[in-house]
Image (cartoon, helix red, strand yellow):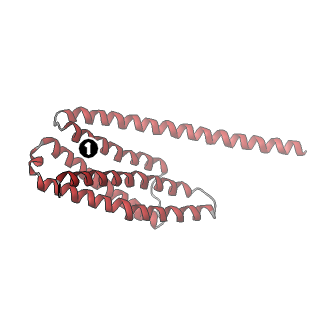
Amino acid sequence: MNILYVKALHIIFVVTWFAGLFYIIRLFIYHVEAEDKEEPAKEILQTQYKLMAKRLWYIITWPSAVLASVFALWMLIDNPYYLQQPWMLVKLSFVLALYFYHASCQKIFNELQNDIIKYTSFKLRIWNEVATIILFAIVFLVTLKSAINWVWGVAGIILFGVLMMLGIKLYKKVRAKKDWDASIDKDLTEETEKIEEQ
């Protein structure tokens, strides 16, 4: 098979792998947030999120991870000189980090499937950004193909990560204020209705 077909297939499965990793964390967040709902909404939502997560994880994410790895290995066997390139070694270290990230998502998946909730939705939102940082690092390394320029790329990724964390905290504060304002409005409406009834 032409190596360009192998490369194209590798890229396609990397994209679907990351799509699965990004979306699975969103499902984890929704599952955790459903814990605060009253019955029967809580049970209905969590059952649905378990089913959606199971299908996503085993039909898209895991197969994509395996196929992306198979086609990557194929390219490395066909072009072993890549392993002599410093940028490739750095890229492979980020890929190793991605495997660890995937394994941690498997752990969270197993816990939620067994109704064990250990993480807040806020912690999961932060955890979701780890995959984004890894994605940026890998794309910059593959595009720049430079062991020196990746240092600037990683510095930018760290800055990007810090900005994302600040954005998440700001979002949390805005959301909490909005919820607080909504509860105040509800209380005021109830008090007004009581006064009008008297």
Q: Is residue 169 above or below residue 52?
A: above
Q: Is residue 84 above or below residue 49?
A: above
Instruction: Please give the name of the residue rendered at 43% of the width and 35% of the height, measured from the top-left corner.
Output: 166
Question: Residue reaching furthest bottom?
Answer: 114
- Horizontal and vertical percent position of residue 87: 16, 41
| Between 173 and 133, the one nearer to me in the picture | 133
Instruction: Please give the name of the residue rendered at 38% of the width and 64% of the height, measured from the top-left corner.
Output: 59
- Horizontal and vertical percent position of residue 167: 45, 36
| Between 43 and 123, the one nearer to me in the picture | 43
Instruction: Please give the name of the residue rendered at 88% of the width and 42% of the height, measured from the top-left corner.
Output: 196
Question: Residue reaching furthest front?
Answer: 2
SS for callout 1: helix
| Between 97 and 62, the one nearer to me in the picture | 62
In the rendered structure, the answer to whether residue 54 lies left or right of residue 173 reads: left
Badge 1 crowding class, 10 Å Cα cut-off, few under 14, some 14 to 19, many 20 or more, is many
Q: Is residue 175 above or below residue 9?
A: above
Which image quadrant: the C terminus?
top right
Amino acid marked by disc 1: Ile
In the rendered structure, the answer to whether residue 165 lies left or right of residue 179 reads: left
Asked where in the image residue 34 lies, by quadrant, the reply is bottom right
- Horizontal and vertical percent position of residue 132: 35, 44
- Horizontal and vertical percent position of residue 95: 24, 50
Question: Residue reaching furthest right?
Answer: 198
Q: Mark 1 = which residue?
A: 138
Instruction: Please give the name of the residue rendered at 45% of the width and 57% of the height, measured from the top-left corner.
Output: 118
Asked where in the image residue 129 lies, by quadrant, the reply is top left
